Each structure stands twice: as structure tokens, then as C-alpha cells.
Amino acid sequence: MLYAYIRKEYPVSTLEQLKMLGAYKCEEVFIEETELASSNELERLSHILQPEDQLLVYDLRAFAKGVKEFKKLLEQLKEHEIRLISLQDKLDTAVMPHFYESVLLVLDMEEKHRKYLIRTSLEQAKLEGRMTGRPRVEDEIISKIVFLFEKKGKSMREIAEICQVSLGTVHKYIRKNMDGSTPSVIED
């Protein structure tokens, strides 16, 4: 079966995409109506696709995926032996049988390279004595958070303001204290 996937107004108008894809006899056209980050229709389509089905898009950008998400999508299409056709990209995996392997190889290399750059940058920063990551919350502040919550009955928002930490930090240490994994609180 031949299915089409369109992202509303991206990368070109929906009408233009429909015109181009309309020349093909698609079983169903899935139109992603929501914001760019959403993929509800693509998710629905992925549950319908069967081995050897065909997926037609105007342009690969219609998937609106970052490298990691695009790699995952291609792996799924390859695994289910889906024929991918992109009109603007002049792509047809039936004509280019090694497309999935080639692109996945490049995406894998890019991912490994990015991880290497991040790791070496962090190592270099440590060697230069620069702080990386979030600063550690001092034990005194942790004890004060727990004390204000348990003994003084302050709200978590008030505690965050008093201790000059985020509300998430207050939640974290109160939860840890309830689990019994932080030092005992200070007394009056």
C-alpha cells in the first residue's frame, strides 16, 4: 500500500504538497496539523505500515526531526522494509537499495563524533579548573531546607525563596529526607 505524509505548511504550503503527492494513488494521506515538534500523525502512520508498504513525502524535512529522531525513524522504516519516496530529494529506496544503511552509517558517525566532542570539552574544562554541571548544594542549605519544611512548616515556595534555590531543589531534598537518605535536620 502507498501512504503519504505531509506536515502542514512545512517545508512548503500544504496545498503545494497535496498537489505533488496527489499525482500518486495513495491509500491514505496523513497530514500533521499540529506544531513542528509534534508527530501524532506520523506515530499513527507508523502503526499502520506493514512490510513492503510505501511511504511518500514531498521532502524529508516533512518529518521535522533532529538527527537522533531521524535516525530512529529510518531504523524503523528499514526494519519494516518500507519503501521511502521523497519527491523533492529525488529519493526512492527501491532505486537506492543501500540508502538506509548509508544514511544510518553517517548519522551514527555524527552521533559518535558529537559525543566525543562533548566528552573532550568536559575533560578539558576540568583540567583548566572550570566547573561543569550544576553547582553542588551545600549540606547547610540542605539541612535548612528540611528544617524549614518539617519544623517551621514553611511552604516549598517560601523555602526556595529563603534558601535562594530552585523549587525543584527544595522538592528534591524534602523527598530525599522523607526517604531517609539525607542527614538529620538542625534543631532550634
Image: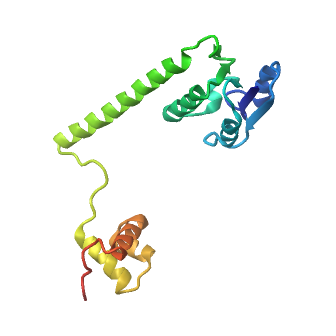
Extreme residue in the front direction = 51
The picture quadrant where one finds residue 187 is bottom left
The spot of residue 97 in percent (x, y) is: 58, 13
The spot of residue 141 in percent (x, y) is: 28, 71
The picture quadrant where one finds residue 179 is bottom left
Q: Say left or right for 175 vs 3.
A: left
The spot of residue 36 in percent (x, y) is: 63, 39
State the count of labels: 0
The N terminus - image quarter: top right
Q: Is residue 11 above or below residue 169?
A: above
Visual colour scheme: rainbow
The spot of residue 83 in percent (x, y) is: 66, 21
Please tell me which residue lies in front, 105 or 124: 105
Q: Say left or right for 93 vs 170.
A: right
Extreme residue in the bottom direction = 188
Name the residue: 66% across, 36% down. 46
Name the residue: 28% across, 57% down. 135
The C terminus - image quarter: bottom left
Q: Is residue 9 above or below residue 155?
A: above
Name the residue: 55% across, 17% down. 99
The picture quadrant where one finds residue 124 is top left
Please tell me which residue lies in front, 83 or 124: 83
Extreme residue in the top direction = 95
